[in-house]
Amino acid sequence: MLINRLDQTENVLQLEVCEAIQKLEPLELDRATFYEILLQREWVSYCFTPVYDIIQNRLSPLSITIKPTIRQIIQEEYPDSGWPPTGEVPSHREDLVTDLISMGVTEDQHRNSWFSAQTKVVMDESVESVRICLDTEFPDVALIAFLRFWGEVLTAVEYKQLKPRILMLLGSRPSRFYLPHIKHDEQINSLAGAEANTDSTTHADELGKHLARLISNSSSKSRAISCAEDSCKKAALLKVTFYAQFHQ
């Protein structure tokens, strides 16, 4: 199956992101440096919803079936149920800050933190990547591949690599953001069997089903896969570039 090629590419790229993080030796880092990594990563998280909104509104009618999935992911970021909303339920970004404080980041440290020059580059290029996807031969494939790999698959990879140190700092306190996002976002099933798999409903796998179907219906599966691979490579490069700023 041609789509196995995309699975193989994604596996290699995931390893590259893992290696970029492991070079930092998260368990050995002093607290201040580890806190700074998480504080900078918080800024990248603010790009999540805008990128999903932009992609959602630029998909062609060919991808209409994926829109409810993307919409649901966006709405999960603000889990206040009912109408009118009560305003009592924290957003995921607020949960992120709760975890930071639980790990020992002070209110002043968080309030006074700001994005670095390199973090700003990563934020800007995350949005610019959407425009690049639109200029490809198969823009829908490129857009969904980027959204899934950047926003879900690699996000779970990042947090998994940081998880041991996060758990150490949290102690007995629960995680409201990082650990739940690993569970919700991670890839469980390969793309090769995505359409047949019904045993996983993570964000990565749900988007993977749509991506596999779109590739399968493309006029050239090989060229569509190449578009997806390019999107995944861009997503991985953004992650590696972000962590490179912390290398000594």
Image: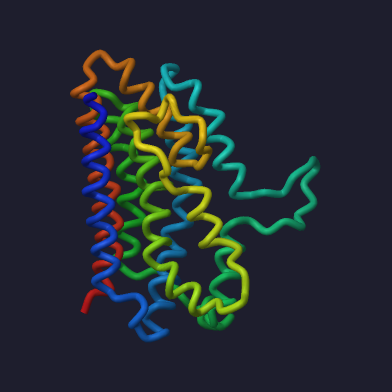
Residue 88 appears at what percent x and percent y? Answer: 76, 57
In the picture, measured across the screen, residue 87 lies left or right of residue 58, that is right
Residue occupying the point 35% across, 44% down: 149
Is 196 drawn above or below residue 104 in the view shown? above
- Tally of numbered discs: 0
Is 109 drawn above or below residue 49 in the view shown? below
In the picture, measured across the screen, residue 135 lies left or right of residue 144, that is left
Residue 20 in view: yes
Q: Specify the quadrant of the image occupied by residue 216.
A: top left
**In the rendered view of the protein, which quadrant contains the N terminus?**
top left
Residue 28 appears at what percent x and percent y? Answer: 33, 82
Residue 111 in view: no
Residue 3 appears at what percent x and percent y? Answer: 26, 28
**In the rendered view of the protein, which quadrant contains the C terminus?**
bottom left
Colour mode? rainbow
Relative depth, front residue between 31 and 167: 167
Residue occupying the point 37% across, 56% down: 157
In the picture, measured across the screen, residue 178 lies left or right of residue 129, that is right
Relative depth, front residue between 59 and 225: 225
Is 59 drawn above or below residue 52 in the view shown? above
Residue occupying the point 27% across, 37% down: 7
Is 19 drawn above or below residue 39 in the view shown? above
Residue 196 appears at what percent x and percent y? Answer: 43, 25
Relative depth, front residue between 237 and 57: 237
Q: Specify the quadrant of the image occupied by residue 106.
A: bottom right
Residue occupying the point 34% across, 64% down: 119
